[in-house]
Amino acid sequence: MESNPSTMREQSPSCLEITMEVHSVVPPPHKSTIQKLKTRLKETLFPDDPFRQFKGQPTKKKWVLAAQYIFPILHWGPNYNLKLFKSDIVSGVTIASLAIPQGISYAKLASLPPIVGLYSSFVPPLVYAVLGSSRDIAVGPVSIASLILGSMLTQQVSPTGDPVLFLQLAFTATFFAGLFQASLGFLRLGFIIDFLSKATLIGFMAGAAIIVSLQQLKSLLGITHFTKKMGFIPVMTSVFHNSQE
């Protein structure tokens, strides 16, 4: 039986010709070193591009946007309603039940009067409500900062011998610490935290928890003459030598 070539050609699948277009890649425009440095600084210091909202706006609108950028309460304040106020009351009472004893204990760590701890737990969140923009952030004193402040000042002035001078030095130290932090924020230097590794941050938090826990041995064991140092060895030495008091 002979096969017909024409029939085989009809039964064979058709061949598809695929044409590929090759697009040439255009190289990026040449930038000088100054232009590259300017772009890199803009990406580092202003990643959110805060000046973008001012482009193409009239002068009056720019002043309003600038005020809302500095004081975010002007942005969300007009939309505040009774429902949000009720939710804030519930959350405020809940946080106050924790912040009040926490502020008193942190003031005790710094060898300061308890009223100072209450003010430090109330005033910073109130200021942040006007100047801050984040809804999920904790503002107030921290244990390790209180402990370091008390340990630093105790080496120079006795909190019981001269309480007025001790309180003045504490206010001066916290004032300059706040001024330094405000300067970091104004200069947009928050990117410095990116140079700290995760292991460093975890080690710092773990070390702070251990130091704070060791400092509580003074009150738990009723030791009168306790060491002013925060290291593990000085604290344990003071515990073993003065535990019989």
Image (cartoon, helix red, strand yellow):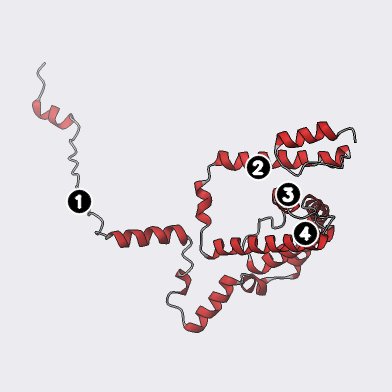
Q: Secondary structure at mark 3?
A: helix
Distance between mark 2 and mark 1 Cα atoms: 53 Å
For the residues bearing labels 2 and 1, Cβ distance under 8 angstroms: no
Pointer 1 or 4: first along the chain: 1
Q: Amino acid at mark 1?
A: Ser
Q: Is residue 98 left or right of residue 187?
A: right
Pinpoint residue 183: horizontal percent, then vertical percent.
Answer: 56, 64
Distance between mark 3 and mark 4 Cα atoms: 12 Å
Q: Is residue 180 left or right of residue 123?
A: left
Distance between mark 3 and mark 2 Cα atoms: 18 Å
Residue 166 circle label:
4
Pinpoint residue 80: horizontal percent, then vertical percent.
Answer: 69, 70
Q: Quadrant of the C terminus?
A: top right
For the residues bearing labels 3 and 4, Cβ distance under 8 angstroms: no
- Give the class, few, some or many, for how many residues have Cα within 10 Å of label 2's Cα (few <14, many ≥20): few
- Give the class, few, some or many, for how many residues have Cα within 10 Å of label 1's Cα (few <14, many ≥20): few
Distance between mark 4 and mark 2 Cα atoms: 28 Å
Along the viewing direction, whichever of 158 and 179 lies nearer the viewer? 158
Pinpoint residue 155: horizontal percent, then vertical percent.
Answer: 73, 50
For the residues bearing labels 4 and 2, Cβ distance under 8 angstroms: no
Q: Quadrant of residue 8?
A: top left
Q: Which residue was labeled with disc 3?
A: 151
Q: Which residue was labeled with disc 1?
A: 24
Pointer 3 or 4: first along the chain: 3
Q: Amino acid at mark 4?
A: Phe
Q: Amino acid at mark 2?
A: Met
Q: Which residue was labeled with disc 2?
A: 205
